[in-house]
Amino acid sequence: MIGRLNHVAIVVPDLAAASAMYRNALGAEVSAPQDLPEHGVTVIFVILPNSKIELLHPLGDNSPIAAYLERHRDGGMHHICYEVDDILAARDQLISQGARVLGDGVPKNGAHGKPVLFLHPKDFAGTLIELEQV
Ligand code: CO
């Protein structure tokens, strides 16, 4: 069912430092920071040959990643995103297998303007999983 790895999201306490580390130490192609106020994050895209890394930092008062950064002061891996062809079919198959979909189960428009859902980390080896319909 799942297809390509779309991105790995890493919450960072200092975007400029994380950007410099990926650019200089790891030699990666790194975008400028982009504010996504409707998602409560500022993001920097690290472009890899076969996928992306998203460096996320809280933006605004109700950021969904603020609590994560409180618990992980040095930052950390927040979620991984897999591509699916049909997000509703994927959701229904997951529910039939006993997996928990976060929220009301209705796909929302994600940071790339495409429908996404999140799956409970306790059902997936402690990893928050995002599904994105591509
Ligand atoms: Co994501």
Image (spheres, grey):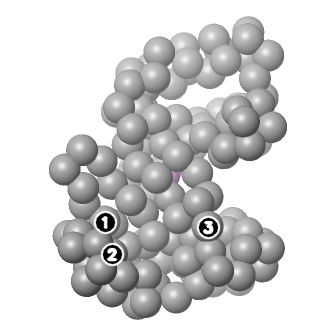
Total numbered badges shown on the rendered structure: 3
Q: Is residue 19 left or right of residue 110?
A: left
- The span from disc 1 to disc 3 (Cα, nearest Å) is 15 Å
Q: Estimate the x, y position of residue 78 in percent, counting from the top left.
A: 61, 58
Residue type highlighted by circle 3: Gly
Q: Is mark 2 within 8 Å of ligand 1?
A: no
Q: Residue at x 37, y 43 (%)?
A: 6
Q: Quick check: 68 above or below 79?
A: below
Examine the image and state in which quarter residue 69 appears.
bottom right
Using the image as rendered, state which of residue 113 and residue 34 is in the foreground: 34
Q: Residue at x 53, y 64 (%)?
A: 10
The secondary structure type at the circle numbered 2 is helix
| Crowd tier of the residue under label 1, counting other residues whose Cα lies within 10 Å: few below 14, some 14–19, many 20 or above | many
Q: Residue at x 47, y 77 (%)?
A: 42
Mark 3 highlights which residue? 76
Using the image as rendered, state which of residue 69 and residue 33 is in the foreground: 69
Mark 2 highlights which residue? 22
Disc 1 or 3, which lies upstream in sequence? 1
Mark 1 highlights which residue? 46
Mark 1 or 2, closer to the camera: 2
Residue type highlighted by circle 2: Tyr
Q: Quick check: 110 above or below 115?
A: below
Q: Is mark 3 within 8 Å of ligand 1?
A: no
Rendered-image quadrant of the C terminus: top left
Q: Residue at x 69, y 66 (%)?
A: 64
Mark 1 or 3, closer to the camera: 3
